[in-house]
Amino acid sequence: GRFRRHFGSRVAVLHSGLSMTERLDEWKRIRDGGAQIVVGTRSAVFAPVRDLGLIVMDEEQESTYKSEQSPRYHARDVARRRAAWHKCLVLLASATPCTESFWHARRGDYTLLTLRARYGAARLPDVTIVDMNLQEPDARSASLSPQLIGELGDNLARGEQSILLLNRRGYNTLVKCAVCQTVAECPNCSVALTYHSANGHLMCHYCGFSQPVPDRCPQCGGPLKQVGAGTQKVQAELEAYFPGIQVARMDADTVNAVNTHEKILERFQRENRPVLLGTQMVAKGLNLERVTLVGVLDGDLSLYVDSYRAAETTFNVLTQVVGRAGRGQRPGRALIQTMTPEHRVILLASRQDYDGFYDLEVGLREAKGCPPFRDLYTITFSGPDEGQVLRGAALFRDSLLSCLETAPYRGLSCHVLGPAPAAVAKINYHFRYRLTLRTPKSREVHRLLAYLLRQFARDRANRGVSAFAEINGYN
């Protein structure tokens, strides 16, 4: 909308929300020169722009620029290739650049341009870290601290708006038996089912399986209890604390083809709703002048996931969502609720100290041999027969190790780990095992893996087992 106000019909839009006919019309208009500016999501990097002169990647650190389906490209890599081909400029824009991009900038591979002040001379919000270990065991809410409730009440009294981030949808995280401790799990996937109060069902967020909540434990007949909190439960708690409050909730359960996130944000602004509650959707890209308070309900939720990017992801989300407060004339403030208030990533994010975080993170990456210092390949094997999947992964590993002992690779100091079950070992009846290869940046290794994957696919013994490789992935 902003670009069209400035440039009119010269702007084209490409994203998956368009129908096939709309997308084809836009594609032809771009190809024929009818549009000189393309605004879009990841796939827009392939737009057939004539005389390409500039590619801008906003929020370049976002993991959604990496495709999780074949072809598993990263839009940043495609942008760099296209820029080299067309001899044009790539601009990577972010308040929290990914570690690899900033490493290249520090080395002088990229030109670094730094904005030291917020747009419109707005001041950064004041940030308070709330230690949730001090929360009373019998507190009315385990998710909302007294400090945050008080700040929300003050904002309501002043007629100002607030944003609350909880990166976990549903009502409860899981349902378990109070006697035998059995957790309700998905029969198709190796994950716990999440309780959703809207339909009173337990749901799997991976395969979509759904079932009503049983009255008693199917194993021992004991009573069931609900554990943890998602956005639905927090919404209910807010409505109990502040009767009559209108909470705009934005997560995968409320956003759909009809009730788009644009419509939710429009109602939030037009109707001046006091609270916007949501998952990562509310953390980035919002420029709402009446928002003066941001609350992060579980600041360390992503800090301990099984990924070398865990610290970076946590820092980025916290920094981005805190930056939603105070973007207008009124000063902003933010509260980060956490069980680890002394963690350096939490402290650096509260100070919006990207340089301090980068210095910490790049040292750890170098010590662990992670990108940008070495490449990290993940080869995933999947199939309905667990034994066959594990067998295929082991044979692939043996072939890889044998090849790495030969002359072209012997001096590369490569390390192979696995096969081991993936973080979620089974999804929709398919078992998943992974190999991890840590290696210096090498085209030879890249070609070797491509060759071995082709050989794996041709082997009839591996029928029913799929395999794919990712380099420096996000999952």
Image (cartoon, helix red, strand yellow):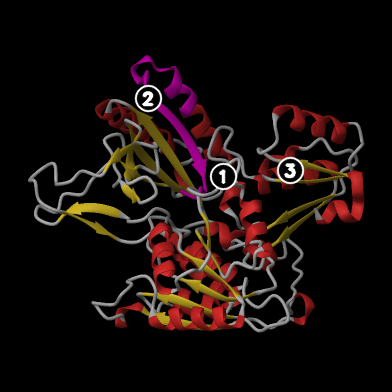
Q: Circle 2: is it few (<14), some (14-19), or many (20+) Cα within 10 Å?
A: many
Tag 3 secondary structure: helix
Query: Is 333 positioned to the left or the right of 133 in the image?
Result: right
Q: Which amino acid type corresponds to the residue marked 2 in the rendered image?
A: Val
Residue 26 bears which disc, if any? none
* Quadrant of residue 299 within the rendered picture: bottom left
Q: Earlier in the sequence, mark 2 or mark 1?
A: 1
Query: Is 426 positioned to the left or the right of 272 in the image?
Result: left
Residue 465 bears which disc, if any? 2
Compared to residue 177, the image places residue 114 above or below, namely below
Distance Cα–Cα, label 3 vs label 2:
32 Å
Compared to residue 78, the image places residue 261 above or below, namely below
Residue at 33% across, 72% down: 141
Query: Is 69 positioned to the left or the right of 379 in the image?
Result: right
Q: Residue tagged by mark 1?
A: 442
Measuring from the top left, give residue 249's x and y in whole percent: 52, 58
Measuring from the top left, give residue 348's x and y in whole percent: 52, 78
Q: Which amino acid type corresponds to the residue marked 1 in the rendered image?
A: Ser
Q: Earlier in the sequence, mark 3 or mark 2?
A: 3
Q: Is residue 464 magenta?
A: yes
Residue 366 shows in this picture = no
Q: Is residue 86 magenta?
A: no
Query: Quick one: 95 or 139, which is closer to the camera?
Result: 139
Q: Which amino acid type corresponds to the residue marked 3 in the rendered image?
A: Arg
Compared to residue 109, the image places residue 389 above or below, namely above
